[in-house]
Amino acid sequence: MIKARVNPNSGWHWVYYWAIALIGAGALCFQLYVGVEQTEKRFDQKIQTLSEGVRGSFYDMERHLKESYNFLLLHYGQNPQLTELVHPQNRQALYDFLKPEYDAMRQLQPNLFVMHFIDPNNVTILRMHRPEFAGDDLTEVRPIVAAVNQNRKQASGFETGRNGFAYRITSPLFDADKHYLGVLEFGVRPEYFIHRLNHQFAIKSQVLVKSEKLQPLEHKATYPIVGDYSVVYTDPIFNHLPVDENKVSQLIHRHDRTYLVVTGVHLGSFDGEPVAKFQMLEDITDFYQTHLRNLWGQIILGGSALLVFLVLLYLILRSYSRRLVATLNEIDVLQHKNKVIKHASEVDELTKAYNRRYFNKQLYWLIQQLDRREPVSILFYDIDHFKKINDTHGHLVGDEILKGLTRFVRNHIRSDDDLIRWGGEEFAVILRKVGLREAVEKAEALRLGVEQITWTHDIKFTISISVVQLHAQDTPKDVQGQLDKLLYQAKQSGRNRVEH
């Protein structure tokens, strides 16, 4: 410490002393303000990350459901034994024909709530889930059915039927000769989404449906009413918490625990009208206590520093800096967790490859950043005659094939190459710093490797591959069109080929 010679009769040393104290106090207050702002920002970021992660996973589950049931729809349309029975006069025969397969589907997917055949005039032919109720006209009570019968295009969304509220995939049904037979609808309970989201994000949930949308129910259940909504599903913990339904996000403190409640996803009907909302609750007690400790720690530290600043200015500033470093380290940990959650929303649930959302984002970015000195190529491939594998061995074996193929391809590409499940049995590989010639060689090696392997259940199959190299003038739509066209050529030329 530098000692100044002080005249005991002079007050100027106090002026300097307090000037330094005020400057130091101002600096400490500014640092305290920055620390508080960073802590609050972390909290807001947690809310946003949770909402976006749940929303992304929810939409991925919707897509997976559509893919699964579209495959069944195609299978049924190509089965003349079934299509000949789609008529009110054959209701019992249709039920007997489908009952074993329906029971098997229910066993695999307990939340399958609806399998419903409807004629072109919106009249029920058969409810597999309620076979005793048939012949009712759905025109006025089931808008999605009337819309699909009118335009003969698939629609999906949440809607209430006579027997309950469900997510419905409603599709036109044609026979092998393209004769229109009516509508086939599959529906799953909201619990399908809830259980998966609860497991993935460690949250509790409840589903609130607009009360007016529950009018079609044949048996009026006594649901708890919250404003304009009825609670059709809830975790018991919501019954003990004072949730304000008008807030998008809120903190609730109860019995020494702290909960974050977020309305993260609005559930829409087939035409996009919001009919329900999905509320999620996360126990953030540990996070919140850390948040408070950091906040109060900064306040106490700042106040203490002001009291002893005149004596130990250097030591207090150094102590505060250490605390700030600790806070920044905690922020780094939270940012890492946020990246993990974001990564989960871009990964296919079955194969753990990246999903189409990731592919679209990467494709747009790669075209924008394309450097001629570092080319980028894309492989697009699918399994030849995959439908036959599913028809012969079942969907579970088909899923094992998809996972096995994913492992094989991942083991034969570089760590910085991206493997994407485009949908169904279609995949893509992004090859960075690889030109067209090298990409074609890689595609041929993959094709030969797949052909030579005997897969699970002694299955052998081949793949067809299309290859393109990106150019600066390309658009994502152009690239996808080229890949589709080349893959089609490979299929038309006998399959088990590489086209570029």
Image (spheres, grey):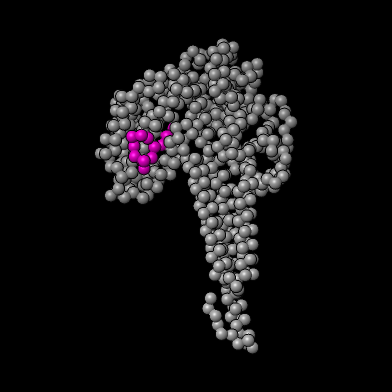
Q: Is residue 481 visible?
A: no
Q: Is residue 199 visible?
A: yes
Q: Name the side, left or right, on which 230 lies relative to 489.
A: right
Asked if the magenta segment contains residue 304, the reply would be: no
- Residue at 50% x, 16% y: name it: 83
Q: Nearer the viewer, residue 323 or 412?
A: 323
Image height of 117 relative to 369, above or below:
above
Where does the image place residue 463, in percent across and percent down from the top left? 34, 27
Count of residue discs: 0
- Residue at 54% x, 23% y: name it: 108
Give residue 493's quadrant in the image: top left
Give residue 107's quadrant in the image: top right
Image height of 372 relative to 273, above or below:
below
Give residue 241's quadrant in the image: top right
Q: Name the side, left or right, on which 236 lies relative to 155.
A: right
- Per the rendered image, the range of residues in magenta is 410-423
Where does the image place residue 51, in percent across and percent down from the top left? 57, 44
Asked if the magenta segment contains residue 421, the reply would be: yes
- Residue at 63% x, 37% y: name it: 205
Q: Quarter of the image containing the C terminus?
A: top left
Where does the image place residue 196, in percent across and percent down from the top left? 56, 34
Q: Name the side, left or right, on which 331 lies relative to 382.
A: right
Where does the image place residue 17, in percent across and percent down from the top left? 60, 78
- Residue at 44% x, 24% y: name it: 398
